[in-house]
Amino acid sequence: REAGTTFDLTACVREPIHRLGGVQSYGALLAVKAGRVAVASENAAEVLGFEIGGDDSFLTAEQRAGLWSLADADTGQTAMMPLELGGRRFDVTVHHADDHVVLEFEPAPDTPEFGTLYAPVRQALTRLQRAATVVEACRAAVREIREITGYDRVVAYRFESADGPGEVIAEEVVDDWEPWLGLWFPATDIPPQARRLYERNWIRVIADAGDTTAQLSPAVLPETGRPLDLSLSVLRTVSPFHLEYLRNIEVTSSMSVSLLDGGRLWGLIACHGRDPKPLSPQTRAACEFFGVALSLHLAALRERDEASAREQSRTVIARLLERYSMDLPMRWSQNPAGLDQVIACDAVVVRTDGALSLHGVGPAEAEHLMGALSVPPPGEVWHSDTVDGPFPGVLVLPFGTGDDCIVWLRRERTVARRWAADPRTPVVLGPHGQRLTPRGSTAVFLASVRGRSTGWTTTDLAMAVELGRAIMGVAVAQARQLALLNV
Ligand code: BLA
């Protein structure tokens, strides 16, 4: 293929990054099954300082018991234990994979760090608790994580959707690196299988992008016919695509901490160093702990926002009910104009008994729109900001029986975004083959987002749900009155 053309991005999505058959060489991996060392990284003797035989007798009974019970403890976080072997001290991380107990040995730092880490981490958490918004919390987080780790750049990166592009919403960076705050990065920079891994692990450290991987032996497990599953490994080697990415942005070491909400990844704290940096297991554990606390705090902020949106909408709807009482639904089916004051929009359609009342949209357009619409069950709302056509923003509230519903519509709004690379061609072919294009302001690319409306906010959705409840309440009251009249 010619220079300048894109390459097949499906190669990224297909790469089995959890079974690349190697580890970062600053540590060693052993996988033990039934007392036998079934898999070892080729650097094991070098890292450990002795030749391991074919079995796990290099561990004392006590060490073995400690490690195995740690592997069984289901904490959802990395299980780690300090261990002395042949006069060398290690931090050993342990987990189960492919029916093996996987032991990962990292040389322990000369001075124990827990004492020196406890105070800054506690302080960092206190500062975090004071943050009142998501962006404020992320700003506090990047400052604290930079303080604890000493990376050259720390950013909070928020995805637009689970597998979508993202934006840098907070940053701390050394003076001689260009700032990335406000830049958008293409979705393909982090393929879906990597995102799924970051949902299972809180943290991912790449100590040295120039490292030569220590291969696992045997390369393939006889039981499975595949390389050992390294999904939960802390030393897991890195995809050559991502290594190239790091070289392109002149980064040698990196760490990312997952930001999860309800188990789903919505962002990362991404850290970069210009030099190699084998983060000590203690520091890593501190960052992991911090990531968990940050995620909980962010979820709490979101819940608080949702609760206040609900509260606000109840007040608005109650006021409307006071004013119009039982006439409320009728009023809107005849003239839906007032509905754009409940939820901001460009047009509204109300369908009652198959008849449409319109505001801001012509009959032909409305017919077409409503024909393609699926109405959710009562009590729910359906919304999108990317529907094809002149109104990409659609919010549907069913009410009454059958197909009765209120539909709020929003027109396309173009938003300018500053991209760190052209999102349509995130990878190009150069004279030396496939190259990931550099990222950053040198490549800043301005583009508007087309085919979208402004998104429906938490308050918009809460308002629709509350309105649905109110209409239901009116209908019940009317039915009761009718019943009374009939008696
Ligand atoms: C992983 N890509 C990553 C990671 C980040 C990024 C943060 C997690 C690993 C790490 O911490 O280094 C990308 N880094 C970013 C972005 C920002 C940042 C967007 O700082 C913005 C602030 N990458 C590509 C292409 C491919 C690719 C085209 O650009 C595929 C061909 C792959 N990225 C890729 C893979 C991983 C990755 C495979 C997983 C690495 C691993 O965990 O083994």
Image (tube, rainbow, N blue to C red):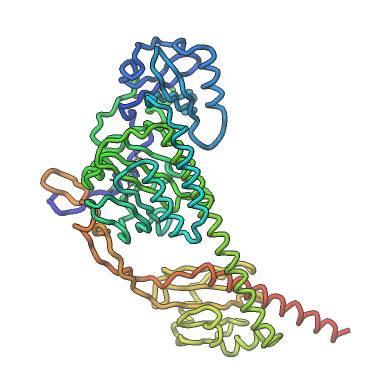
Quarter the C terminus occupies: bottom right
For residue 392, above or below residue 75: below
**Residue 213 relative to residue 109: left or right:** left
**Residue 273 relative to residue 224: left or right:** left
Viewer can see residue 168: yes
For residue 260, above or below residue 200: below
Q: Residue at x 16, y 49 (%)?
A: 429
Viewer can see residue 193: no
Q: Residue at x 34, y 29 (%)?
A: 23
In depth, the one of 24 and 101 nearer the eye is 24
The percent position of residue 281, horizontal first and vertical second, equals 41, 32
**Residue 48 relative to residue 462: left or right:** left
Q: How many marks?
A: 0
Q: Residue furthest right?
A: 487
Which quadrant of the view contains residue 486?
bottom right
Which quadrant of the view contains residue 46?
top left
**Residue 140 relative to residue 248: left or right:** right
The percent position of residue 345, horizontal first and vertical second, equals 47, 80
The percent position of residue 61, horizontal first and vertical second, equals 53, 12
For residue 420, above or below residue 212: below
Q: Residue at x 56, y 70 (%)?
A: 375
Q: Residue at x 31, y 48 (%)?
A: 153
The percent position of residue 307, horizontal first and vertical second, equals 60, 64
In depth, the one of 221 and 186 nearer the eye is 186
